[in-house]
Amino acid sequence: MSEKKIDLNKSIFSKTEYQKTINTNFSELGVNNIIEDIQNSPTVDDFFILYDQLFYEIPERGDTNSHEFLTQTSGEYIDFKENNEEIQALREEITQLRQDLLDAQIQNVELQTNQSIESTQIQELKNQIDNSSDNNILEDLNNEISNS
């Protein structure tokens, strides 16, 4: 074997030259800095674009990664159950107020016309109010009594 001579060159940098010459950011290793991470993180718009694209691929039910999971966690976040209970209580109050208003208007019509309205007609109207959000029921009652 023949021996070959290899010359090694050693470069020495001062502290200021070192920082200008050598990249110390580890960018060659694929590590991002915080600003790059923030810029590359998905936005809310990006989420909803992906959600629309993946909508039918997401399972309907499941403990995680499902529509059921999304609605439960979002519902918990916005206090949906509490809001829903409040809405139900308000609906019940509206129904009661409608019934009270109907009773008062029936009494008013009976006093104006000197005619008694049959209890079956009243019950039918109350049932209509319970099953409908139509505010014209009371007008229909007034028209019906006026036409009799």
Image (tube, grey):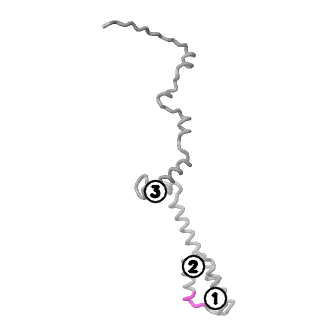
| 10 Å crowding of disc 2: few (<14), some (14-19), many (20+) | many
Q: Quadrant of residue 98?
A: bottom right
Quadrant of image for the N terminus: top left
Farthest residue, direction right: 112
Give the main secondary structure, helix, strand or loop, of the magenta stretch.
helix
Q: Quadrant of residue 35?
A: top right
| 10 Å crowding of disc 1: few (<14), some (14-19), many (20+) | few
Viewer-proximal residue, 101 or 6? 6
Farthest residue, direction left: 1
Please state the horizontal and vertical placement of residue 93, each as a whole percent of the image: 57, 72
- Quickly name the residue at label 1: 144
Q: Earlier in the sequence, mark 1 or mark 3?
A: 3
User: Residue drawn 37% across and 7% down?
Assistant: 4
Q: Give, as a single range, the part of the protein colored magenta.
A: 117-121
**C-alpha span from label 2 to label 1:** 16 Å
As displayed, is residue 127 above or below residue 4?
below
Residue 39 on the magenta span = no
Please state the horizontal and vertical placement of residue 133, each as a whole percent of the image: 58, 75
Indicate the secondary structure of the residue bearing disc 2. Answer: helix
Please state the horizontal and vertical placement of residue 61, each as a whole percent of the image: 41, 58
As displayed, is residue 13 above or below residue 73?
above
Amino acid type at mark 3 = Tyr
Q: Quadrant of residue 62?
A: bottom left
User: Residue drawn 52% across and 23% down?
Assistant: 23
Quadrant of image for the C terminus: bottom right
**C-alpha span from label 1 to label 3:** 52 Å
Q: Which mark is residue 129?
A: 2
